[in-house]
Amino acid sequence: MAPWALLLPSIVAAAIKAHNFLEGEDLLHDLCDEVRLHIADLERLDAACVDNPNRSDLIVSLTTIPSRITAIGDTLKSLLRQTRSPAEIPTGRALGARSARTLRSRSRRFR
């Protein structure tokens, strides 16, 4: 076996440890969490959110554009699995390019 192959696990472990320290995250835990979130069932999370007695008065509103509509699922799943459920999560969709430009200009205005 090549000598570098014996060092490879140590190098990978050091790189992960450096990433965790510099980013303030836990890379392996976060990757596992992303996988769990991706395979979670949206309807099941929604039902659990509705049944959650620990509710907030906050309304979380989401708006997206047609080209990003397929990416909103994981965002909704993440919001639905919070320990304190929001009161409501209304979603909106910009209808076309003109609406998308309006959405961008409005979001810049309110930042």
Image: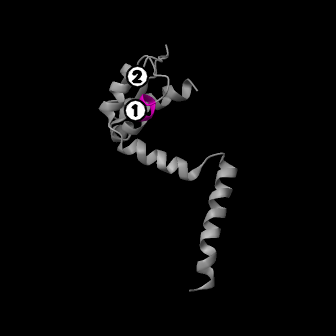
Viewed as shown, does residue 39 lie left or right of 19? left
- Residue 84's spot in the image, x, y percent? 49, 22
Q: Amino acid at mark 1?
A: Leu
Q: Residue at x 37, y 35 (%)?
A: 65
Is the residue 21 above or below the residue 100 in the image? Answer: below
Q: Which of the 4 quarters of the picture holds residue 98?
A: top left
102 vs 2, nearest the viewer: 2
Q: Which of the 4 quarters of the picture holds residue 74?
A: top left
Q: Amino acid at mark 2?
A: Ile
- Residue 73's spot in the image, x, y percent? 36, 37
Residue that label 1 marks: 76
Callout 1: helix, strand or loop? helix
**Badge number at residue 89:** 2
Is the residue 53 above or below the residue 39 in the image? Answer: above
In the rendered image, residue 108 lying in the magenta stretch gets the answer no
Which span is picked out in magenta? Answer: 77-81
